[in-house]
Amino acid sequence: MARMHSRRKGKSSSTRPHRTEVPDWIPLTAEQVEELVVKLYREGHPTTQIGIILRDQYGIPSIKLVTGKKVYKILEENNLLPRYPEDLTNLVRKSMRMRNHLADNKKDIYTKIRLRKVESKIHRLSKYYKKIGKLPKDWRYSPDQAAIMLR
């Protein structure tokens, strides 16, 4: 299937080997891994980087394999959920950077087109999050209020 905003198909990538049991060489228990996830989140690392840090620094190939839960579920059990979903905040940050760029470079048509595409992704994603209940029903994206959202 083709990508949404570029008429190309994605490139194939490597896949993780299929495992059903925890490897013997992992030195940490499930409780220790959950404590590490909570500690890393409290230090300010986003949820997407926690898995990378645990893989690279602690030798844990998959948090879900060790604990039976995903990072988001662990944070939810410890009442540490972010106010807004991370992918939505990343898109809002990107649109803010583009708007700041366009304030200085008004004739940059390429960035104007890309900004429209990013904002359409924000609207589509927010519609989904409203439907599943992660965002309030009356939440709306506006570029003026985006800075307040990211605090």
Image (tube, grey):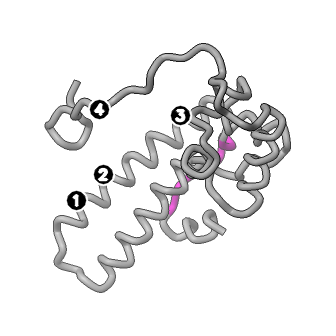
Label 2 or label 4, whichever lies nearer to me, is 4
Q: What type is the residue that disc 2 sits on? A: Lys
Locate residue 27 relative to residue 96 in the image: left or right: right
Asked if the residue under mark 1 is in contact with the one under mark 2, i.e. CB atoms within 8 Å, the reply is yes
Q: Looking at the image, which residue is at 23% across and 24% down?
A: 1
Q: What type is the residue that disc 1 sits on? A: Ile
The percent coordinates of residue 42 (x first, y second) are 77, 59
Q: What type is the residue that disc 4 sits on? A: Ser
In the picture of the structure, the residue carrying the numbered disc 1 is 113
Q: What type is the residue that disc 3 sits on? A: Tyr
Dominant SS in magenta: loop
Which element type, helix, strand or loop, lies under badge 3? helix
Which element type, helix, strand or loop, lies under badge 2? helix
Residue 45, by quadrant, is bottom right
Asked if the residue under mark 1 is in contact with the one under mark 4, i.e. CB atoms within 8 Å, the reply is no
In the picture of the structure, the residue carrying the numbered disc 4 is 13
Q: Looking at the image, which residue is at 72% across and 54% down?
A: 41
